[in-house]
């Protein structure tokens, strides 16, 4: 009888305190990534768009590398997020012409921003 109760407590601990929270976090991260992908596809009206187009990946990689080389200022994840957002802001400001942002100019500005932050395109 004691073994069954101990086994049941172990089962509850493993399932409810370890596995279920991990599953819920994985679902939340998947929903966030799906939303980001849908926003990219809607912005460019292209189902094949990727984060390299606006220089987000290169900017985030640059921020993460800075946080790794100079630890103590910002955590790696936060630095990658901040530099990714700075890269997107720089891309939009570079692509803006007379109050408009043409799609071709936005893509070219993203390539320039990715190049300036040290990113490498796998296709180029």
Image: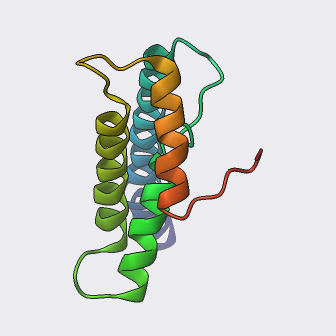
Q: Which of 75 and 9 is in front in this view?
A: 75
Pinpoint residue 78: horizontal percent, then vertical percent: 29, 64
| 95, above or below 77, in the image | above
Residue that sits furthest to the right in the current view: 123
Residue located 59% across and 34% down the image = 50
Residue that sits furthest to the front in the current view: 98
Q: Nearer the viewer, residue 25 or 16?
A: 25
Pinpoint residue 42: horizontal percent, then vertical percent: 45, 14
Rendering quarter of residue 68: bottom left
Residue located 25% across and 87% down the image = 72
Determine whether, in the image, residue 89 is placed left or right of residue 84.
Answer: left
Q: Is residue 10 visible?
A: no
Pinpoint residue 39: horizontal percent, then vertical percent: 41, 23
Pinpoint residue 67: horizontal percent, then vertical percent: 36, 78
Determine whether, in the image, residue 79 is placed left or right of residue 58.
Answer: left
Residue located 33% across and 56% down the image = 81
Q: Is residue 104 visible?
A: yes
| 121, above or below 73, in the image | above
Residue located 52% across and 52% down the image = 114
Q: Which of 17 and 33 is in front in this view?
A: 33
């Amino acid at each position: 009888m004691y073994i069954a109760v101990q086994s049941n407590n172990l089962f509850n601990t493993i399932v409810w305190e370890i596995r279920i929270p991990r599953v819920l976090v994985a679902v939340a991260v998947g929903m966030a990534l799906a939303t980001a992908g849908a926003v990219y596809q809607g912005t460019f009206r292209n189902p094949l768009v990727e984060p390299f187009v606006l220089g987000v990946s290169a900017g985030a990689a640059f921020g993460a590398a800075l946080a790794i080389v100079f630890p103590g200022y910002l955590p790696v994840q936060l630095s990658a997020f901040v530099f990714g957002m700075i890269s997107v802001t720089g891309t939009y400001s570079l692509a803006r012409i007379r109050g408009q942002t043409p799609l071709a100019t936005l893509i070219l500005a993203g390539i320039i921003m990715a190049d300036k932050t040290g990113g490498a395109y796998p296709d180029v």
